[in-house]
Image (cartoon, rainbow, N blue to C red):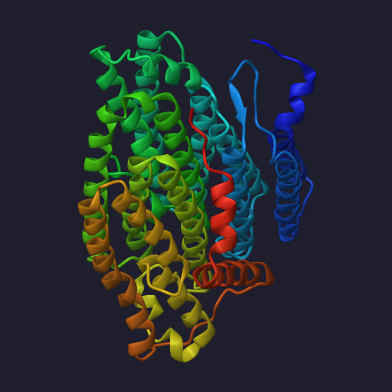
């Protein structure tokens, strides 16, 4: 491997996050329990420094460490996304952690480590680097899922996540090893050149691609690799559920697209039918099963599965429009899903858990502001104008139509109509039923700031999407 100390400049944001996480673990020993918020703001400061570093490197396009690590606008775009998701999650977590009596400094450290893992993933220029970043992310999430150690369902969620995640990682690694045996390299550009030359007659190719689909399909919660999602989402602390529903999913889709477009673009005819099947099955199961859920975290879990099906359309379409629509979709989904979970989080106070749809009964009459905010996010998740969710789905379905997959776009639109039922059911419960009790919301300046940012972003992008679309177009993955 070619190495020079000058290359460390290009991974400065990752170094900052890693050192910051280690510092958080040490500072936690000296900070009293009632002052743990300081660690949260320190973590946001670390994210801000890393954000500045990535912003300064935004125009850089280079491969370092012998092609193991790639720096380009595409990677930078997703790094900005995970910074934003991490900061908003920390803001939403502070009061919740105090209420649940789990306000420990290592929580913020693991968010930073998970963010570092995602940054390695999106900049990976080699399948080995993809795997290393994925494992750093996964191990952090396994721990965070079981953070409510006094609750059996949280420990169960962590155990299920660990066991199933380990199997998926092993299958992914097996697929990587088969691909290495076929092509003699794990470098993405090397693989792309190998298959572009027409070396597609190896019988192990389909097996290796299938294993890669299984590994990435688990990470993005695509059917039939979704079985972990409802139980883990329900059992994990709600801010952790919010975080894992957006940031790891976005990073996994980013590397999913990079691997299949850059390394396996020459064999698209082989893997496209597999992904089309997965996308249709994921959209159908996610939307249909979400209808019967009474727990809002499980409903949003199946909603997350359905949205993974929509996002797969971007990979299937490929090219500039498919890539742009996927990147746009993931950014908007992060904002609206974090906001929806934010409202669920502030309902957790006293004896109120805020996790059942029935807990929202009559919210509009007792707290109209919270109800309006939740209504905006439900409308956006359903893809209704004038919210950002409509813009996201419009570009995805338009990409499918222009790629000649009109029937896939029609399936997506019909299932979006199905999704409107369970999203609008929450709105109906808030506005059409009489409240049975008062709502004492667990609001705080930090949580309020997070909700204001996400609400305004969803409305602004819905009404004026041009700035985000332009930024997305400037960061499209360039495939030779």
Q: Is residue 186 left or right of residue 409?
A: right
Residue occupying image coordinates x 58% and y 72%: 456
Side of 1 relative to 465 (left or right) = right
Q: Is residue 270 shown left or right of residue 89?
A: left
Q: Position of residue 323 (x, y in %)?
A: 45, 44
Residue 183 location, quadrant: top left
Count all numbered tags in the image, as a single digit. Answer: 0
* Observer-nearest of 346 and 80: 80
Q: Position of residue 233 (x, y in %)?
A: 40, 53
Q: Is residue 348 visible?
A: no
Q: Nearer the viewer, residue 475 or 174?
A: 475
**Image point 54% across, 38% down: which residue?**
140
Compared with 201, 92 (above or below) is below
Give the quadrant of the N terminus: top right
Query: Is residue 288 visible in this depiction of the protein?
Result: yes
Determine whether 272 is above or below 154 in the image.
above
In this view, the residue in front, 184 or 244, is: 184
Q: Quadrant of residue 166?
A: top left
460 relative to 23 in the view: left or right: left
Residue 74 appears in which quarter of the rendering?
top right
**Residue at position x 43%, y 87% in the image:** 437
The spot of residue 369 in percent (x, y) is 53, 84
**Residue 91 location (% of width, % of height):** 64, 61
């Amino acid at each position: 491997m070619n190495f020079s100390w000058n290359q460390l400049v290009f991974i400065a944001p990752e170094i900052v996050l890693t050192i910051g996480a280690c510092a958080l673990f040490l500072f936690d020993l000296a900070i009293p329990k009632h002052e743990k918020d300081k660690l949260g703001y320190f973590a946001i400061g670390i994210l801000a420094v890393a954000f500045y570093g990535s912003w300064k490197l935004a125009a850089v396009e280079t491969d370092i460490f012998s092609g193991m690590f790639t720096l380009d606008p595409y990677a930078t775009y997703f790094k900005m996304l995970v910074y934003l998701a991490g900061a908003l999650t920390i803001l939403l977590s502070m009061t919740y952690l105090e209420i649940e009596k789990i306000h420990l400094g290592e929580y913020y450290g693991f968010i930073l480590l998970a963010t570092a893992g995602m940054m390695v993933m999106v900049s990976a220029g080699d399948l080995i680097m993809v795997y290393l970043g994925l494992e750093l992310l996964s191990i952090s999430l396994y721990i965070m899922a079981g953070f409510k150690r006094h609750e059996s369902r949280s420990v169960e969620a962590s155990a299920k996540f660990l066991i199933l995640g380990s199997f998926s990682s092993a299958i992914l690694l097996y697929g990587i090893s088969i691909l290495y045996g076929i092509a003699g390299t794990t470098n993405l550009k090397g693989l792309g050149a190998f298959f572009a030359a027409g070396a597609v007659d190896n019988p192990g190719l389909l097996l290796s691609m299938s294993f890669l689909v299984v590994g990435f399909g688990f990470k993005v919660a695509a059917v039939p690799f979704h079985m972990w999602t409802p139980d883990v989402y329900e059992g994990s602390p709600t801010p952790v559920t919010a975080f894992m529903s957006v940031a790891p999913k976005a990073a996994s889709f980013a590397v999913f697209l990079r691997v299949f477009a850059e390394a396996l673009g020459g064999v698209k005819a082989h893997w496209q039918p597999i992904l089309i099947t997965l996308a249709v099955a994921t959209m159908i199961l996610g939307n249909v099963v979400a209808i019967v859920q009474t727990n809002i975290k499980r409903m949003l879990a199946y909603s997350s599965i359905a949205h993974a099906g929509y996002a797969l359309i971007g990979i299937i379409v490929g090219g500039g429009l498919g890539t742009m629509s996927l990147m746009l979709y993931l950014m908007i989904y992060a904002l609206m899903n974090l906001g929806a979970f934010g409202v669920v989080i502030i309902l957790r106070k006293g004896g109120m858990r805020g996790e059942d749809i029935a807990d929202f009964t009559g919210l509009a009459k007792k707290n109209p502001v919270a109800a309006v905010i939740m209504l905006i996010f439900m409308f956006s998740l359903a893809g209704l104008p004038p919210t950002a969710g409509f813009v996201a789905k419009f570009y995805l379905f338009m990409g499918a139509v222009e790629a000649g997959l009109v029937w896939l776009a029609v399936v997506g639109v019909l299932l979006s109509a199905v999704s409107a039922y369970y999203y609008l059911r929450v709105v109906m419960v808030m506005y059409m039923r009489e409240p049975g009790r008062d709502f004492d919301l667990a609001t705080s300046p930090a949580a309020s700031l997070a909700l204001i940012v996400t609400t305004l972003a969803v409305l602004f992008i819905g009404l004026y999407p041009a700035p985000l679309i332009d930024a997305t177009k400037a960061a499209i993955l360039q495939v030779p």
